[in-house]
Image: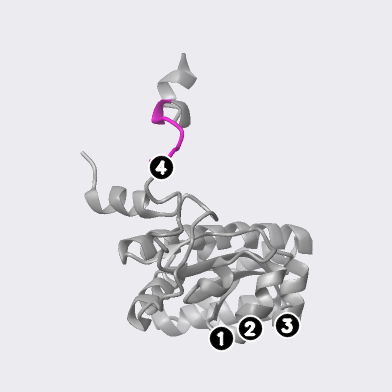
Amino acid sequence: MHSPFITDAAKDISNGTLICLNGGMVPQEKVDLILESIRLSASSAGFQPYQVLVIQNKELLEKIKPIAFNQPQITDASHLLVFAAWERVTPERVDAMIKNIARVRNVPEESLAGIRGYGDQFMAQTAEQNFQWAARQAYIALGTALIAAASLEVDSTPMEGFDSASLDQLLGLQERGLKSVLILPLGYRDSQKDWLLPQAKVRMPKEDLFIEDEVLLN
């Protein structure tokens, strides 16, 4: 058995950055649902060590386009999501998380010593270790966004093809203790220009992709 919702949404996800967008605007209620799916996405210990910039200003998108090697999806998108990971875990960020959990769950902060302990472990690591962990967490949120967008019949295309240092400078991310790791244009396919649309989606056969435990035990 399989869930038609899950398989259909997965099939609807773009094959990649070859997608062409038509410049149409995504209704705000759909954008809000995609953003809420990101907010509720799974995250290690609930830390969510990233922030997501929501960009629709056309002048700003024009400035981002050359940073993304002039890929047309940037300016043809309705919205551009920039996933930016924490440069490092700080006491201030751990404190903010603890206070938020205590507020939402209506529990004393002292009862969250175990979660604070996770924060202490992260702070004992190097900045590079912090960032690499945070970037991987951002990718989990990206996966959630892709499925959410597809389920809402909104096209999206995850992109790593951009100069992150230049994008960070343009958006002032360093001042926020963030580094951009990936971008996600949202919009609608241009069915006239997207040569990939009528093509069958090509992925590895499940026999090659998945390794069952019985194989490992033989």
Label 4: state its secondary structure: loop
Write the residue at 55% across / 56% down: 17
Label 1: state its secondary structure: loop
Quadrant in the picture for residue 119: bottom right
Question: What amino acid type is highlighted by mark number 1?
Answer: Asn
Question: Which comes sooner in the sequence, label 2 or label 4?
Answer: 2
Separation of residues labelled 3 and 4 (CA atoms): 38 Å
- Name the residue tied to disc 3: 172
Label 3: state its secondary structure: loop
Question: Which comes sooner in the sequence, label 1 or label 4?
Answer: 1
Residue 82 appears left or right of 157 = right
Task: Answer above or below: position of 189 versus 112.
Answer: above
- Name the residue tied to disc 4: 201
Quadrant in the picture for residue 182: bottom right
Disc number at residue 207? none
Residue range corresponding to the magenta coloring: 200-207
- Name the residue tied to disc 2: 60
Question: What amino acid type is highlighted by mark number 3?
Answer: Gly
